[in-house]
Amino acid sequence: MTSGLQALEYRGYDSCGYAFLLGNTIKVEKRVGKGKIRELFSGIPERTDSQACIISHTRWATHGKICMDNAHPHMDCKNEIAVVHNGIIENYAHLRKILEQKGHRFISETDTEVVPHLIEEHEKHMRFHKAVMKSLNELEGSFAILVLRKDGPGIIGARKGSPLLVGFYEDNFLISSHINPIMEYTDRVMFFEDGEMFIVSNNGIRVFNLASGGEVEKNSVRIKSGFAKSDTGGFESYMQKEIFEQPEVLNRTFESFSAEIDRYDREIDFLPGRIIIVGCGSSWHAGLIGKYIMEDFLRLPVDVEYASEFRYRNPVLLPDDLVVAISQSGETADTIGAVKAVQGYARVLSICNVLNSSIVRESDYVFYTQAGPEIGVASTKAFTSQLATLYFLNLLIGLKKGVIAKSSLKKRIEEFKELSGKILEILNTMTHIEKISASLQDRQNALFLGRGIHFPVALEGALKMKEVSYIHAEGYPAAEMKHGPIALIDEHMPVVFVSGAGRFSAKVLNNMAEVKLRGGYIITVTDDSVSEMKKVSDEIIVVPHIDNEYLGPILTVVPLQMLAFFTAIKRGCDVDKPRNLAKSVTVE
Ligand code: M6R
């Protein structure tokens, strides 16, 4: 009964629950906690009969504290209608007030609970599925929703802004917000557009358009099921496994790009005048590195935008803009919002790790990253594969712009092949990095500083550190330190410098001297001026040098991932499921 939830537990939750039909009643089980789903529901037998109708949910609290009452499923007054919901109902306070005036009793603080009550209210005047439809049309905000009714037609589902799909396995329907849990069973899947509702029952599946109420013809599709079921493969955590998978991921990225380059070249049949990169978190950092590469190589203007700001900012768009949306999951609500905001004004290319995800389906072009399923909440292999993909996109546009000739493209692609061996060398310094993490484990704060293309790497290093170890870490351009953060530096402040070989060496050394003078504890990650940097650093991690400086960040970020990982482990943190974080942020 909970195996579907188990497959999604890596995405983060603070409570969970399910509802199913038992005789003439709906039975609900809920648990509060972040423990393993299997343990939370231990002792409850699995239902395997083919008539079972089950809806289940993991909750990541947004409206209302973490407690049993606020966990899903939510019920109507008569306990006949159960609802699970992802997303946010923005007009819930208004709806709740009206429903309470009509006598409905609420037991939770959630936005979701208005839904079963609203359906219950409308059902007084119409058939059940019409009542569901009417209710969903009254909701503002985003939802992927499932509704189960005692004596009902089966399960009703609908989506608007949050992912939902149905897989077909023998006579069963497997409904999920993500493709991972169902790929083990089937490769036949139906995806839905926003504003569609479906009913699955013993008679099959029927799809409706929520706005018109009309029935919609829809086909399932076969999806490529190349990715094996995930496990930690002998590592103690997914995060560690995923850090160690990076050499293999980069080889796959290389092979995939080499095989697909002609198709990409044909498909992207225009030369952009400007590139706007949108994303969140680590994907945004990858975009920032893309800007350093593309502006330098292509001499095209490149803007990098937080998707959450861009989508509401009314940005000026030009007809030859190319918007590049970067997302591991393809389901990040703000990035989807940004993509939708530019549709009809600019072309969208997504760089995404999940097949047929919402962002992919909203884009004109897609470059899939070849990371495979990333289960750890902290992005590691997805981040480096985004960098690799941006590098290849840069080459492809360079080809169109005439910055690079087809004859020299091969050499540029070949340079990429050096990376996986070099990452292996870094991974082999694991014991050294683990030792350095001991000097961080009891700290409260840390600064991460870098210049040029390594400044976004510093941002990413700081994000990794704070999300998995809970040490407050900030990333800055190294020179910006003088404009404020320098006030924080004393013997209690570790400062991690990220430096790649190139024109900034002397300047980075100056910044290091400034920190040293004030007693700061310096950890340096570099392939550069090693001997001088050694003199001022308390600890140094040397990464192999790569001549192509655009590829440097793929190397310098790896020790930062390892540093965050080992520090977190030493502090007893759960690296795969850091507190308060979800793997895929489907609310804005
Ligand atoms: O799935 P996405 O790439 O769109 O996710 C964006 C961010 O939520 C994500 O990168 C987040 O910052 C990670 N936890 C970072 O490790």
Image (cartoon, rainbow, N blue to C red):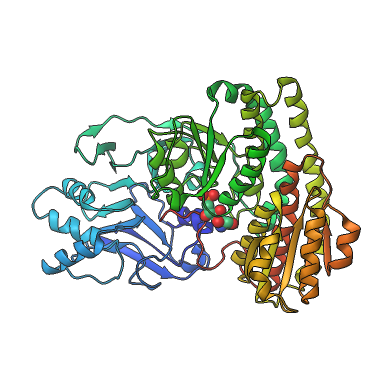
Depth check, front residue: 356 or 561: 561
Q: x, y (%) of residue 562?
A: 72, 60
Front-most of 484 and 220? Answer: 484
Q: Residue at image x 72%, y 59%?
A: 560
Q: Residue at x 77, y 31 (%)?
A: 414
Q: Could you tell me residue 498's position as x and y percent? A: 75, 57
What residue is drawn where x is 39% and y is 65%? 62
Viewer can see residue 233:
no
Q: Is residue 536 above or below residue 215?
A: below
Residue found at the very far front of the displayed protein: 483
Q: Image quarter for residue 538?
A: bottom right
- Location of the C terminus by quadrant is bottom left
Vertically, is 324 above or below 541?
above
Q: Quadrant of residue 254?
A: top right
- Residue 566, how many percent across, how many down? 72, 66
The residue drawn where x is 80% and y is 62% is: 510
Q: Is residue 473 left or right of residue 104?
A: right
Is residue 417 visible to the viewer in this orientation of the structure? yes
Give the x, y percent position of residue 65: 38, 73
Quadrant (top left, top right, bottom left, bottom right) of the N terminus: bottom left
In this image, 155 relative to 310: left or right? left
In this view, the residue farthest toward the right is: 531
- Compared to 2, does 388 lie above or below? above
**Image position of 430 (left or right of 272):** right
